[in-house]
Every structure is written in C-alpha cells, then in structure tokens.
C-alpha cells in the first residue's frame, strides 16, 4: 500500500514539474512572440546598390543576399537587363523612369514636356519587356518658376497622354511622393489620382520621403488599394537618409500595421544610400535588416 502511494506521489510530482516547465515555456513564448510573417517581396532600386560590377554581377549579388527582385532604370540596355534577370533569377519589381527629373512633365516648355512624355512611354515599354507591372514616375516639380497648380495641371495632362501606352503594354504608372515641392499631403495624392481617374495609374509610396512631412501611416489609409509598390527607406530628422534601418524616425510597427490593414502584400523596394551595400557582407546585413522591417 505504501509502495503504491509512493509511486502515485512520484508520478504526480513529475507531472507537476513537466506542467510547470511547459507553462514557463508558454510564458516565454508569449513574452517574445515570433516575428509576424508577411507576404512582402524584397527588392532593391538598382542605382542604390553599392557593390561594383556589371549588371549581371550586381543582380547575382542581390540574389545571393536574399533579394527576390530589382528595380532597374528605364533606358538601360534591354539585352543586359534581360540576361541578368534570367541568369540571376531575380524578378523586375518595377522600372524607374530615367527622364522624369531632367525632362519634367510640368516644365513650362512644351518640347521638354513632350520629351518627358516619350521618356515615360519608353519606361512603360521597358517594363513590359522585363515583366514589371508598374513604372515609377515623379510627376513633376513645383519650383523654378512652376507653381503648384501649374505642376498639377500639366503633369495630369501629360500622364493622360501616356494612358494608351500603359493600356497597350498592360503596365501601370505609379506616382511617387518625393521632395519636389509637390504633393506633400495624403489628400493631395488622392486629389491627383482622382484628377487622372484611371485604373492604370496608382501610387508608388515612398515611406522615407513621407516622414519629412507627416507620418507615413497617415498616407496609407488614404491611398489604400491604389498603392502599387513601396519604397522602403529610413529617414532621420538630423541625418536624413544617412541612417540605417531602425536608427531613424520611422515607426515601422505602426507603418506595417497600416499596410496590413489595407491588404498590401506586394513589393518592398529599398532605396537607401549605396554606401550601406558596398560589399557582399554589408549587403547581406542590409538584407537581414529589411527582413526585420517587414516583420515589425
């Protein structure tokens, strides 16, 4: 009888110990939850990659570091880009229009605007060749004698002229918020898209650029499903873009939650300064930092 009781007492004691251990592990897991998994795809804007080499060598370096895509510029050698995409296994996340800063769609000179429009059309054609679904476009610049309303009217008119090419190629035009003294508030972005009023035009939301003016998370609900692509960029009020991820003023958990709320699950394209990715080791660390941003 005593042996039986002792045996039952021993088993009960072991059960309590195991249960306590399990409870402890459960509490630890609750205290340190695993990073949230998101379906965001990681890419980098081609000119911001610091590693030296050919287009193919740079694409391969991105792939080795864990990137899935790249954002080439328009007007590059199509053969070089296609070969690099095929051999590296990267996808074209987007194409950035190469002419939108020096041949602006808001320029007072009609011939300059016409050249800018042709540059946009070529970017759309390049994107189709590379398999990218959108082209990043800076719509205009509201300075140097161009006021806001003029920039708005001229750029809307020129973008509408590009819509037939967008429809023909199946590539959308994605307007980016930049430091061009134009569209610095979410409602202004909404007004601009409504003025164009086309399903072929959406937004390429630059998170870092927005921080200077207002919290990025206030833009996201306004733009909603019209966000076609993201530029992932850290910004600090003192050092501007010369900061690493999590060392600036971006509130990444809040930003990521806002993106979750609107159902964004597309490309996140880095545009940090090239000195942060100057060799394979720094590129690998940068890639891991982007993963942490996505999991915030």
Image: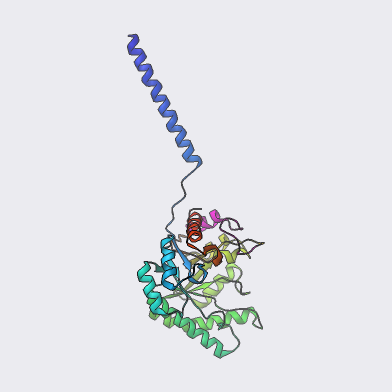
Residue 139 in percent (x, y) is at 55, 77
For the residue pair 274 and 216, the one nearer the viewer reads as 274
For the residue pair 255 and 20, the one nearer the viewer reads as 20
For the residue pair 1 and 84, the one nearer the viewer reads as 84
Residue 250, quarter of the rendered image: bottom right
Q: Is residue 202 visible?
A: yes
In this rendering, position of residue 293 left or right of residue 12: right
For the residue pair 152 and 48, the one nearer the viewer reads as 48
In this rendering, position of residue 184 left or right of residue 281: right
In this rendering, position of residue 238 left or right of residue 115: right
Tally of numbered tags: 0
Residue drawn at point x = 58 percent, y = 68 percent: 187
Residue 259 in percent (x, y) is at 49, 59
In this rendering, position of residue 139 left or right of residue 126: right
| Region rendered in magenta | 239-260
Relative to 43, residue 104 above or below = below
Q: Is residue 170 visible?
A: no
Whether the magenta-drawn stretch holds residue 252 is answered as yes
Check the image and tell me how it is coloured: rainbow
Residue 219 in percent (x, y) is at 56, 64
Residue 114 in percent (x, y) is at 52, 88
Whether the magenta-drawn stretch holds residue 265 is answered as no
The extreme bottom residue here reads 111
Relative to 269, residue 12 above or below = above
| Picture quarter with the N terminus | top left
């Amino acid at each position: 009888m005593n042996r039986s009781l002792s045996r039952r007492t021993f088993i009960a004691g072991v059960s309590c110990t195991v249960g306590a251990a399990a409870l402890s592990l459960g509490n630890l897991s609750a205290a340190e939850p695993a990073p949230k998994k998101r379906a965001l795809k990681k890419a980098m804007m081609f000119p911001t990659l610091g590693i030296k080499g050919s287009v193919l060598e740079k694409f391969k370096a991105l792939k080795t570091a864990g990137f899935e895509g790249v954002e080439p510029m328009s007007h590059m050698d199509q053969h070089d880009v296609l070969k690099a995409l095929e051999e590296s296994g990267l996808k074209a996340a987007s194409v950035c229009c190469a002419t939108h800063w020096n041949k602006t769609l808001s320029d007072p000179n009609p011939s300059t605007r016409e050249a800018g429009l042709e540059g946009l059309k070529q970017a759309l054609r390049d994107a189709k060749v590379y398999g990218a679904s959108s082209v990043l476009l800076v719509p205009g610049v509201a300075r140097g004698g161009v006021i806001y309303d003029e920039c708005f009217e001229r750029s809307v008119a020129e973008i509408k002229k590009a819509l037939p090419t967008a429809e023909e190629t199946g590539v959308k035009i994605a307007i980016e918020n930049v430091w061009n003294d134009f569209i610095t508030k979410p409602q202004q972005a909404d007004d601009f898209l409504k003025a164009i009023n086309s399903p072929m035009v959406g937004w390429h939301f630059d998170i870092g650029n927005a921080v200077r003016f207002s919290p990025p998370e206030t833009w996201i609900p306004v733009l909603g499903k019209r966000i076609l692509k993201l530029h992932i960029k850290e910004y600090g009020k003192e050092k501007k873009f010369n900061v690493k991820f999590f060392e600036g003023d971006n509130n990444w958990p809040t930003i990521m939650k806002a993106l979750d709320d609107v159902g964004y699950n597309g490309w996140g394209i880095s545009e940090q300064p090239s000195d942060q990715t100057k060799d394979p080791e720094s590129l690998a660390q940068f890639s891991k930092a982007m993963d942490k941003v996505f999991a915030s």
